Amino acid sequence: MRTLSSIFTFPTKYIFPVALLLGIGVAIFHSMHHAVPQAVAMQPMPFHILTLIIWMGGVGYVFWFAYQLKRVRFDGTALYVSNYRQECRIQLADVDHVSERRWMRSRPIRVVLHQPCDFGSDFIFMPTARFSFGWDEHPIVAELHSAILAAKNSPRLR
């Protein structure tokens, strides 16, 4: 069985969001409460509120993205999807389509299912890293497309 997910899936899902929350939160708190009094007096209060809103929005987005990430393994006939607590097996014939977010640096892959599994009707995983020239498709996407097509055309399913 081969792991399709990046080795950075676990840190991206569980470690990075907490580090971002704490690191930037402490920096913002420190800058608001330990700055030179004249500098703080010159900044209007809405600036501090805006800074907190932007920080909460950024951290919220990171937590939302990280929550969706799954670890995916592939054995040629099925996908094994895990959130590191539970795992479900998904037959390739149950996959509706696979797409890639090429505009994001991690190039996450989204798999949409015909029927929901334990993780819902779709899931996202970060593929293994590779060198790329811009907008070309990740080889894992092409591999999944061909495996899904072969599974749907298999005589066992007719």
Image: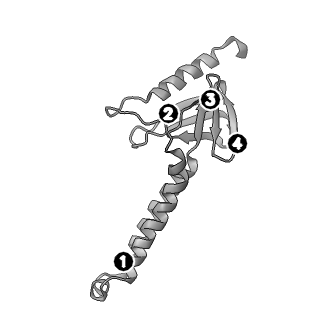
Q: Give the amino acid type for the residue marked by disc 1 in the picture.
A: Ser
Looking at the picture, how far across and down is residue 30, in whole percent? 40, 77
Q: Residue beneath label 4, please?
A: 118
Disc 3 crowd, CA 10 A, few/some/many (<14, 14-19, 20+): many
Disc 1 crowd, CA 10 A, few/some/many (<14, 14-19, 20+): few
Q: Residue at the spot x=69%, y=33% of the render?
A: 89
Position of 56 with respect to 122 (left or right) is: left
Q: Residue at the spot x=55%, y=41% of the render?
A: 124
Decide: is 61 above or below 133.
Answer: below
Q: Residue beneath label 2, please?
A: 99
The label nearer to you, 3 versus 1, is 1
Decide: is 34 above or below 72.
Answer: below
Position of 56 with respect to 83 (left or right) is: left
Q: Which mark is residue 31?
A: 1
Between the residue at mark 1 and the residue at mark 2, the CA separation in whole angstroms equals: 42 Å
Looking at the picture, how far across and down is residue 61, in whole percent? 48, 56
Q: Which mark is residue 41?
A: none
Between the residue at mark 2 and the residue at mark 3, the CA separation in whole angstroms equals: 11 Å
